[in-house]
Image (tube, rainbow, N blue to C red):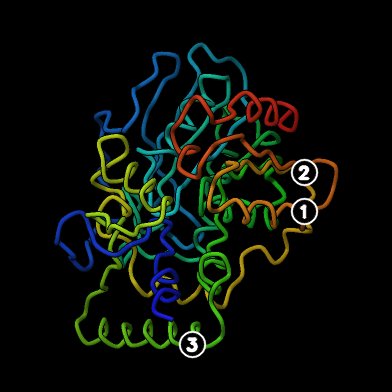
Amino acid sequence: MKQILLLATALIAAFPLSGYGENNQSDITMNENPNLTREWDKVFPQSDKVNHSKVTFRNRYGITLAADIYIPKDAAGPLPAIAVSGPFGAVKEQASGLYAQTLAERGFLTIAFDPSYTGESGGEPRYVASPDINTEDFSAAVDFLSTRDDVDPARIGILGICGFGGFAINAAAIDTRIKATVASTMYDISRCTANGYFDSMDADARYELRRQLNAQRTEDAKNGTHALAGGVVDPLPDDAPQFVKDYHAYYKTPRGYHPRSLNSNNGWNKTSSLSFINMPILSYSDEIRSAVLLVHGEKAHSRYFSEDAFKKLKGGNKELLIVPGASHVDLYDNLTVIPFDRIEQFFREYLN
């Protein structure tokens, strides 16, 4: 039971046991019109093939979202556009920015956005995850792209990484403006929260998780703060699973560490997990009529999420691509294994 509860509370896709150091601070306030960082502070090098700038837009909950926009140099005419976000607990300066910049190099106008309550985006209290709001964030990005003169509103796609792969599929199920969706190294956060990794939780374990999280709500109410769950475990315990070691190698080293990343630091608001227990995000994925490409690593611990999600999808415009030899985190930033050629081909086919 102890191991099950430990895994169940590790749902920030990063085995959150402690922060980067001991600064387990509570809430951090942010102005709804954030003062965006202007210097290049990504974990990947800047491309000389695209123009980059910062933009903001609001979702239907009134939260201001911050994004990096990447536009191919010398681009002419309204372009096909792609909104990118993820992984769950990451920021746009990490994997989503790398995907967005790479796809812009290939001719798409792209944005990589910070989800509500995280990174440079607005929302209070800080570091809240929500199955509804995080799905809405993708639709808000489509709102923004649809109103730009340099975007063809009939050719808009989305791409979600890790937990935001699941939200991307959920967005495709509700938003008919989305013509093509890619989910890379996908997590179904609702399933993982309610059932634990590898569906290891039973009803008793789920009840205990609810009890703990609701006790935390009481503590938060008493304290007037929102306690954080902790980011990727650091230092690594001797018995850490390989996928936890992989997360550490990305989020806790110069390879992928970023000061605004939840997984690199103190993690999500602890009680965020409550809403995911009762709200499965992929309930209507079988009704998606637009194109969907699921990409997952052959050796990823999370591979079963994409395989099971693909079984539910319907239509000849759905594809599951398993990348030989790749782990979950390989698809964050390993340019030798991320199948950008296939992703580009997919978007060109369905954003035509």
**Disc with the residue nearer the chain's start (3 vs 1):** 3
**Tag 2 residue:** 318
Left or right placement of residue 13 versus residue 186 in this view: left
Q: At label 1, which amino acid type do we have?
A: Leu
- Outermost top residue: 74
User: Disc 3 versus disc 1: distance between alpha carbons?
Assistant: 31 Å
**Tag 3 residue:** 207
Q: At label 2, which amino acid type do we have?
A: Lys
Q: How many marks?
A: 3
- Quadrant of the rendered structure where residue 93 is? top left
Query: Horizontal and vertical percent for residue 344?
Result: 63, 26
**Disc with the residue nearer the chain's start (3 vs 2):** 3
Tag 2: Cα neighbours inside 10 Å, few (<14), some, or many (≥20)? some
147 in relation to 227, above or below: above
Q: At label 3, which amino acid type do we have?
A: Tyr
Left or right placement of residue 268 versus residue 8 in this view: left
262 in relation to 221, above or below: above
Q: Residue at x 52, y 45 (%)?
A: 161
**Tag 1 residue:** 313
203 in relation to 52, above or below: below
Query: Horizontal and vertical percent for residue 310?
Result: 73, 52
**Disc with the residue nearer the chain's start (2 vs 1):** 1
- Outermost right residue: 316
Q: Are marks 2 and 1 in contact (CB under 8 Å)?
A: yes
